[in-house]
Structures are given as structure tokens and as C-alpha cells.
Image (cartoon, rainbow, N blue to C red):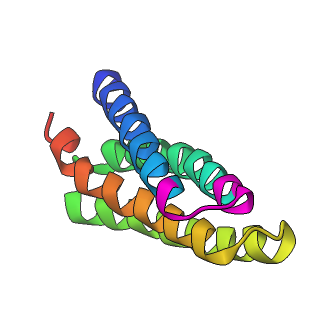
Amino acid sequence: MTQAITRYALVVVGSIALVAWLLSLALTGSAASDAIGISAIVATVVQIAAFALTRSMVRGNMIAAWGAGSLVRLITLIVYGLLAVKVFGLPALPALLSLFLFFFLSMLLEPLFLRR
């Protein structure tokens, strides 16, 4: 179980770093770079935690486990949108778009690691 989480974490960190770099090329400005960086950190932590939660629940019901992980990500996106934009003053488009993309792409990788 720990090996799958470790492998998933390594792939997620690499893919988020790549997407963050690509986004920083498309969305210019120091505030946009800050928003992308913070989103990358939040996404990495939440993705690995959600994967661990999903992995621990997968034996009982895989669809329910994946749904629980998706719910964690959705709640994180909503709370992050409120905090990052309203409280911390990050630009909304780079902050929310980058977090959404990080979550979406990482979720596409999840099934590959849930089977092992």
C-alpha cells in the first residue's frame, strides 16, 4: 500500500511541476506565478492525501472511494477559491484554473495506481 502511494506521489509531483511550468509560460506576471505556485503546493498535498484515503477505502467499494476523494477535491477547490482570491488577494484565473488543472490531471492518473 505504501509503495503505491509513494509511486503516485512521485508521479503527481512531477506532473504538477510540468503543468505549473507550462501554465507559468501562458499566464504571465508575478502574481500569476505566485498563484500557480501556491495552487501547486495545495494540489500536491490534497492529491496525495485524497489518494491515500481512496486507496484505503477501495477494497470496500471503489466507486464510493473515488467519490469520496472527488468530494475532498471539490471542497478544497471551493474553500481555496474563497481564501486565495478573497482573503489573500491572489488573481482568480491563475489560482483557480491551475488548481483545477492539477486536480483533474492527477485524478486521471489515479486509476493506474489504484489497481496495484
Q: Is residue 87 rendered to the left or right of residue 32?
A: right
Q: Is residue 72 visible?
A: no
Which image quadrant is residue 9 in? top left
Q: Is residue 15 above or below residue 79?
A: above
Q: Quadrant of the N terminus?
A: top left
Q: Is residue 20 above or below residue 31?
A: above
Residue sitting at x 45%, y 40% = 17
Q: Residue 98 at x, y = what percent?
A: 51, 63
Q: Is residue 74 visible?
A: yes
Which residue lies most toward the top here? 3
Q: Relative to the observer, which residue lies in front, 68 or 61? A: 68
Which image quadrant is residue 83 in? bottom right
Residue sitting at x 85%, y 71% = 87
Residue sitting at x 50%, y 72% = 74
Q: Residue 7 at x, y = what percent?
A: 30, 27
In the image, residue 33 lies in the stretch drawn in magenta: yes
In the image, residue 60 lies in the stretch drawn in magenta: no
Q: Residue 55 at x, y = what percent?
A: 32, 43
Total labels drawn:
0
Q: Residue 61 at x, y = what percent?
A: 22, 58
Residue sitting at x 26%, y 49% = 110
Q: Is residue 43 rendered to the left or right of residue 101?
A: right
Q: Quadrant of the C terminus?
A: top left
Which image quadrant is residue 96 in? bottom right
Q: Is residue 14 above or below residue 36?
A: above
Q: Which residues are magenta?
A: 25-34
Q: Relative to the observer, which residue lies in front, 61 or 20? A: 20
Q: Is residue 72 rendered to the left or right of residue 56?
A: right
Magenta: main secondary structure equals: helix
Q: Relative to the observer, which residue lies in front, 90 or 58? A: 90
Q: Is residue 36 rendered to the left or right of residue 62?
A: right
